[in-house]
Amino acid sequence: MSPTPYLHYWSLGVEEQFYLLWPILFLLFFKAHRKLVLPLFAIATIFALWYTHIAAVNSFYLPFSRAWEFFAGIVVALLIPQAPRASKSLAIFGWVTVLLSVMFIGTDFAVPGITTLAPVVGSMAILIARSVFTWEPILAWFGELSFSIYLIHWPLVVIALSRYQGLGKITQSVIGVGSILIGYLISRFIEIPFRYRQKHLFSLRTWALSLAAIAAIVFTATNFTGATASNSKFSIDLSEPIIYHDRCHLDFGISIPPSPCIYGDLHSSTLVVLAGDSHAAQWFNALNSIAIKSHWKLLSLTKSSCPAAFLPTVRNGSADGSCAQWQRYIAARINSLKPSKVILTGYSEYQYSLVQSGSYPDLYAQGQLRFDRALGLPVSSIYYIEDSPHPVQSVVDCLSGNPSATARCNFPLTRSAATIAIKTALSSSGAHYMSFSGILCPRNICTALFAGHNAYRDGTHISVTTSTALSSELELSLK
């Protein structure tokens, strides 16, 4: 699915939760014992770094792992006296630190993490220094508008992403300028009048009733709109393979499956293995139905964002140790089990961040060959499924918006350089290379509908219905 235009509200939720809790804590504990804030700040920081390491996504959004950033400001306000005179050197250090953070801390780094300390420390230095530069009023002006700009910028990004494949520099610039302009208008004509005009000062009862009404509207809108929209021509399938729910499709940070992950005919002596990232997991339903029909025992070994290839990836700004460990683990396990067939595939239409530099297609292809050799199997037992075509937009969202003109959601077939390099390398090695692009994309146009349902369940993964419908074609290729 495409990102929701309300995703950025998470930060407002974190702020409001902290603002509700902190005054109570201050009155009960810290008003008389201000120095206790310092160990609380340290504990909150250590907790955030630890929690990010084990659950990066949850840590990004939850208030308890973001509280330390609020405590940093509280430490400055309560414990650090302002400099007796303006300290330009300290201010320069702070601004340089913040600027370098903006320039060099990208999405590959964990947030909140070690790198998050840089902008926080830099901001603390700016507050303590009390040195004002001539250009700071410009930032203060943006600060006055920041709330309105923040509210509008993400919906504009979501709208653009729903219409274009990626955002170029021109589109990003238009979104940036548009956010500032619309943010100014919202601040000037809505936010400021609402905050300061007497007629907008409501009683506590009115505020409570208003919030209750808004909550009821949001609840109704989010719970009673159809998540599986349908019409007379097609239906939407948003389900996931069962391996996502029984702990067999591993999440980030996990290297060893906690469950047996055996499917198909459990008593069969013929073992077949499915291995790879989530683009291998999307083929589980097809392969499981084949295993049941053919009396195969199926072992599923899949992990999010971790290809079944010796391709050292980067997660949260550093080498993904759990992925590398998992790659070694499944290679050794398959080698020891000696299955009849191994089905591999990966998200080669996407470029993972890698530890080493060089030509990405060549690194992926060579890493795939090394992994295949490590399995210790004859190449005739190794089957590789070419990665599914990459939609230019969310197929589900497009179908929902165009139920009577589904052809608008079709997209042209393209192949990445990595996909082509893997095909060349594996075809030369003697392994079986299977492609279903001709079925999904007749005449090089990929259809948004397949077997009466959405071909994709989200931005990149084929739906369970599509996987199941392709089982007969996959069975022919395997036999």
Image (cartoon, helix red, strand yellow):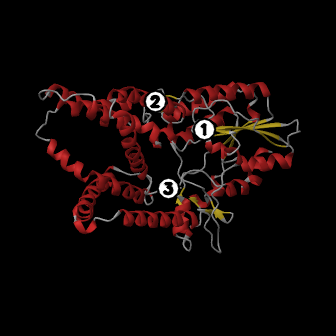
Residue visible at 60% across and 49% down? 388
Q: Are marks 3 and 2 in contact (CB under 8 Å)?
A: no
Residue linked to disc 3: 2
| Occupied quadrant, residue 99 | top left
Q: Position of residue 478 (x, y in %)?
A: 77, 44
- CA gap between label 1 and label 3 equals 21 Å
How many numbered dots are placed on residues in this image?
Answer: 3
Dot 2: within a 10 Å radius of its alpha carbon, few (fewer than 14), some, or many (20 or more) residues?
some
Earlier residue among tags 3 and 2? 3
Q: Position of residue 98 (x, y in %)?
A: 27, 34
- CA gap between label 3 and label 2 equals 29 Å
Residue visible at 46% across and 29% down? 49
In the image: residue 181, left or right of residue 225: left
Residue linked to disc 1: 251
Please tell me whether residue 325 is drawn above or below residue 448 in the rendered image.
above
In the image: residue 37, left or right of residue 282: left
Dot 3: within a 10 Å radius of its alpha carbon, few (fewer than 14), some, or many (20 or more) residues?
some
In the image: residue 114, left or right of residue 282: left
Please tell me whether residue 367 is drawn above or below residue 206 in the rendered image.
above
Secondary structure beneath label 3: loop
Residue type highlighted by circle 3: Ser
Dot 1: within a 10 Å radius of its alpha carbon, few (fewer than 14), some, or many (20 or more) residues?
some
| Occupied quadrant, residue 148 | bottom left
Circle nearer the viewer, 3 or 2: 2
